[in-house]
Amino acid sequence: MEAKKLTPANEDYLEAIYSLGGANGAVRSVDVANKLEVSKASVNNAVGNLKTAGLVQQPPYGDIKLTESGAVYAASILERHHVLYHFLIDVLGVEPARAATEACEMEHAISDDTLRRLTDHLKDQVLEKCSLA
């Protein structure tokens, strides 16, 4: 996904749309605005950017729906968030609310390669704990 990387803000909008509607569901602009605590005008601006990138579809005055590539991109953002969140909590012992905030910030900066390495490391730790039990 790194080839057509969005801004962190646009990734947040994409992730919010995905979390509200899943890969195939349609969501209302007002629901995205409420989730992200932003104005509907901000949502409309971001949706315009996401439409230009081919990641969402929205007919005039209609609901927002992810395209296939939008769903794939959004799922990858959510995966990054989950891996980082669990690393911060389970490995480093960071308090959950702080971990959620910091994982959201980190998910935009981490490369695919570093995320893969982190995921592999975490899997190895889990397997090692299981073999010791």
Image (spheres, grey):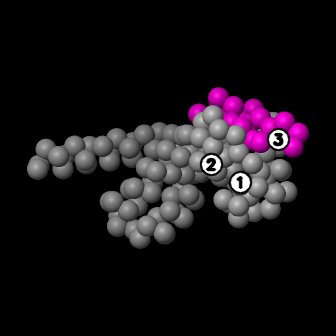
Residue 106 visible from this viewpoint: yes
Q: Position of residue 91 (x, y in %)?
A: 32, 60
* Secondary element at image label 1: helix
* Secondary element at image label 3: loop
The dot on residue 58 is none
| Residue on which the image places disc 2 | 20
The answer to which of 61 and 51 lies nearer the viewer is: 61
* Secondary element at image label 2: helix
Badge 1 amino acid = Val
Residue at (51% x, 58% y) in the render:
103
Q: Earlier in the sequence, mark 3 or mark 2?
A: 2
Q: Earlier in the sequence, mark 2 or mark 1?
A: 2
- Seen from this angle, which residue lies furthest left? 133
Q: Earlier in the sequence, mark 3 or mark 1?
A: 1
Q: Determine the CA span between mark 3 and mark 2.
A: 16 Å
Q: Position of residue 77 (x, y in %)?
A: 56, 45
Can residue 55 be found in the magenta stretch?
Answer: yes
| Residue on which the image places disc 3 | 62
Drawn side of residue 26 relative to residue 104, left or right: right
- Are discs 3 and 1 less than 8 Å apart at CB? no
Q: Determine the CA span between mark 2 and mark 1.
A: 8 Å
| Residue on which the image places disc 1 | 32
Q: Looking at the rendering, in which quadrant would you find the N terminus?
A: top right
Residue 40 falls in image quadrant: bottom right
Residue 50 visible from this viewpoint: no
Residue at (71% x, 61% y) in the render:
34
Badge 3 amino acid = Gly
The answer to which of 40 and 118 lies nearer the viewer is: 40
- Seen from this angle, which residue lies furthest right? 60
- Give, as a single range, the part of the protein colored magenta: 53-72
Residue at (84% x, 36% y) in the render:
59
